[in-house]
Amino acid sequence: MCNSNLLVIQKLLSTNAYLGHRIPTPDFRGYSYGFRNEMAIIDLEKTLICLRRACNLIGSIIGAKGHLLLVNTNPEYNRIIQRVAKRTNQSYINHKWIGGFLTNWKHMRRVQKHFRDFSAHPNLKDAFTSSPFDYFPRFRKMQKCFEGIVTHNIPDCLVIINANKNSMAILEANQLQIPIVALVDSNIPNRLHKLITYPVPVNDDSIKFVYLFCNLIVKTVILAKRSQGPKVKVKGL
């Protein structure tokens, strides 16, 4: 293994990315290095290979002027995902997935337009002493779902932070043949693992790794955009 790989592996070790669950699912065992104290140990060399494949895909999509949708349902990661999306001008969802969000995209676009027209109405601030969303719970839910969407077109790739809790997003993307990059822990169900085109085996409970992964996304996107036009300074979150 070359020195650069060793340095990356050491960085991954520092994030506890190698810590799996007690009983890995059958499809995940190919990513396992062994067990320690009855806990599965994830092979970080394979994690590194999968990370490179995922970044290559993201770079090629952005290079072709495609768009990413970052999907996360862990409140602990909300700010990280939001900052990544805004830094790279990509879309994000930090809320429970709405069924049909991809498979019924045209309808969702109309709902999103309705939400934006409502939230931008000039008379709302004068009509209510507090936020208008307090009077319309339905629109508060819509705000959580649509505030991070910045494209009119269906996304070209989903990047999912916690795959176990986003089975509906995986099923819809797979149905539409949209490539999926997802962090997969050792307890990922076999039925979901088979649908993920670019799995990254890792401890998805490690906020340090999620932060590292998001920095990789930022750098990959900006470097891909740099090849399209004027140079852009690359910096982390």
Image (cartoon, rainbow, N blue to C red):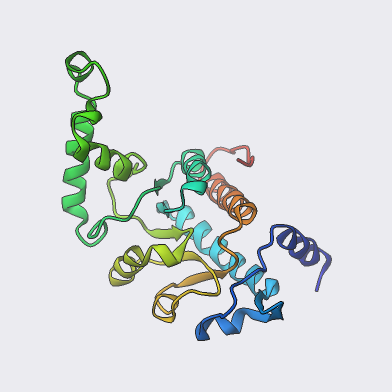
- Give 150 or 202, whichever is nearer the viewer: 202
Please provide percent x and percent y for residue 46: 65, 75
- Give 113 or 93, whichever is nearer the viewer: 93
At a point 32% along the width and 70% down the height, the residue shown is 171
Please provide percent x and percent y for residue 51: 60, 65
Q: Residue furthest bottom?
A: 26
> Does any portion of residue 157 appear in the rendered image?
yes
Looking at the image, residue 209 sits to the left or right of residue 193; the answer is right
Q: Quadrant of the N terminus?
A: bottom right
At a point 30% along the width and 43% down the height, the residue shown is 146
Q: Quadrant of residue 180?
A: bottom left
Please provide percent x and percent y for residue 234: 63, 41
Looking at the image, residue 78 sits to the left or right of residue 20; the answer is left
Looking at the image, residue 24 sits to the left or right of residue 66; the answer is right
Image: 41 above or below 213:
below
Q: Residue furthest front?
A: 37
Q: Residue furthest top?
A: 126
Image: 71 above or below 175:
above
Numbered circles on residues, count? 0
At a point 34% along the width and 44% down the height, the residue shown is 149
> Does any portion of residue 180 appear in the rendered image?
no
Q: Quadrant of the C terminus?
A: top right
Please provide percent x and percent y for residue 102: 26, 59
Looking at the image, residue 90 sits to the left or right of residue 47; the answer is left
At a point 40% along the width and 75% down the height, the residue shown is 192
